[in-house]
Image: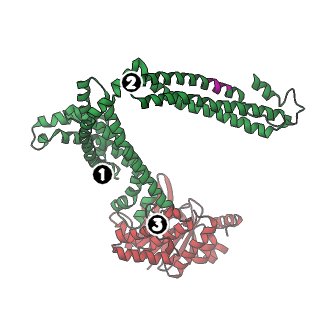
Chain colours: A red, B green
Amino acid sequence: MALIEIRDVRKRYGAHEVLKGIHLDVDRHEVVSLIGASGSGKSTLLRCVNALEAIDGGQIYVDGDLVSGPGVDVDRLRRRVGIVFQSYNLFPHMTVKANIEVGPVHSGGVARPEAAQLAIDLLDRVGLADKADKYPDQLSGGQQQRVAIARALAMRPEAILLDEITSALDPELVAEVLDMVRELALSGMTMILATHEMSFAREVSHRVCFLSEGVLLEQGPPDIIFSDPSEPRTRDFLQRVISAGRL
Amino acid sequence: MTEQIHAGRGDGESSSLPTSRHSPPPASLTRAFTSLTIASLVVIAGWYVFSVAAAQAEAIGSAVRWLCLGAAALSPVLILPPIAALRDSLAARRKWAAGDSATSRIFAAASRGRSLGTFGYLGAYLPVLFIVVVLTANDGAVRTVFLSWDMVTLTFGGILRALMLNVQIAVVSMLIVLVLGLVIAIGRLLPGKPFRPIRALAIAWVDLFRAVPAIILIYLIGFGLPLTGIPVVADQSPVVYAILALALTYSAYVSEVYRAGIETIHPSQVAAGRSLGLSASKTLRIVVLPQAIRRIVPALLTFFVGMQKDTALVGILGLVDAFAQARIYSANYFNLTPVVVVCALFIILTIPQTRLVDGLLARDRRRKES
């Protein structure tokens, strides 16, 4: 059974339908990339999976458990499925270490000393052990995003959603963040990533999904999608990406 | 006139000059003359005013007299900047005629700067002069009515003791307001249909207590509640009623400050908190409020200072606060110096608070940057 099952999910903002019935299954240890133009619904889909947006139709299951609709403990869902945002969204009034500890302590029921050790281990893992007592504003964008990844990992989630996590970064800082994601993929973390980094998506993901205007138009192994897509609109999109020099 | 000829030189009569293709320096001569004229007039006025003040000051003490004489003697210093402006302007003219357009422009710009600076000095000097005129008018009547040193020494101790009541009322009220204001702000921001009555209540509270003048609320509560005869409610001291009335008024203001602060925190911060599995209330407490409160500390202080001043209204309940005490002295001695003493005490009370808050905020910023 798939870890995350997305069944006919619909989302509208007023009259504008952003997701028009999305079906997607993500297996444990699988890395799935969502590609598509801005406004195609990639980010919205991720935010729906994390219940940051309520869905207007369909169901979402995590490990067979229905996690959409009324009466669901969204906090419990979010402990199981983490998310990393495009603009990092670190807490500016807390040190880097405190940013990582806050989830385990206040949501995960982890004792403070244990959470402190966990934070140190995670900072070590993302290569920022020396920044533990700094504040987010004192870090580069790439470093902040690595802290944000560590903060999501601190909840020991079963899956992580990455919402265009390199889009706000200067080009020279993208690599350090992608290295982290690559390492996560190798460690077997289940991930869904919305991304504009086509070559990275091709390299790291087991499956690539192309979204267009709220519809999951085409999905398959990266080699097929990137070299021989069957949908004309996928071809158009990739053609534009290539002519922009991004693939 | 001079300036026009000066400026015209670039394209008119002397087009054979090497500077003809260069842009002329900005006009500076008229300005320099104007500033010199005005500065001279002000210096004469200042010299006269301070001489009169010095003559009057013989009655007060030699220190004040020497101060006035010193000010009169120093007044002519004010014409130095416009003289320098004039010198630079003339230098600009010479350089332009010599074909050195760049140096000419530098001198002209310096001259204009000095002329402007003259007006700056005059703008600061004239109010001082005005105050001295007011204090010396009618043979120093203003001074003796408002600023009698004998009255200060006579009444200062009594007023300072009475001021403790103002401080007590302000501190207790503010502690209540800081909690109550936050509760109202949160009540107003609670989302969804179930909380609609709470939101309505919070809005009504703010509308009501922000609209009613503090002095009327103090009057209503301070004289009204004792008349109700309800046990406990009717048996409090006027100090308690004063604290209650001020707390009600200021809780309305401060809740709006809290609300504004909370609303400045970007929704992405809430999303980040919630995405870690924090509940809505924990996200508010751990993520939103600490950031919001840092931003509103200066505004909170403004209202705290406002409340300290409004403690002077409690005199209508018969309480003898600093202002009431000063009014008693003033009525006894036909002199308003005690009331000026109250003003001075409020100022002395307020300034350290402002500096403290500025210092705390600066420390917070430094910690995040270094």
- Spatial CA distance of label 3 from label 2 is 95 Å
Chain for numbered disc 3: A
Above or below, A47 against B213 in this view is below
Residue type at numbered disc 1: Phe
Residue A67 in percent (x, y) is at 38, 69
Q: How packed is label 2: few (under 14 Cα within 10 Å), some, or many (20 or more)? A: few
Q: Say which of A183 and B124 sits in front.
A: B124
Residue A8: mark: 3
Residue mark closest to the camera, 3 vs 2:
2
Tell me the residue that label 2 is attached to. B59
Letter of the chain that mark 1 sits on in the rendering: B
The structure residue drawn at horizontal position 51% and vertical position 69%, both measured from the top left corner, is A162
Q: Tag 2, which chain?
A: B
Q: Residue furthest right?
A: B16
Residue drawn at (75%, 31%) of the image: B90
Q: Which residue is identified by label 1?
A: B195
Give the number of the mark in front: 1 or 3.
Answer: 1
User: Is residue A175 visible in the rendered structure shown here?
Assistant: yes
Q: Dot 1 surroundings within 10 Å: few (below 14), some, or many (20 or more)?
A: some
- Residue A211 image position (x, y, % from top left): 56, 65
The magenta segment is B33-38
**Mark 2 residue element:** loop
In the rendered image, residue A105, in percent from the top left (x then y), is placed at 36, 70
Taking B247 as reference, is A106 left or right?
right
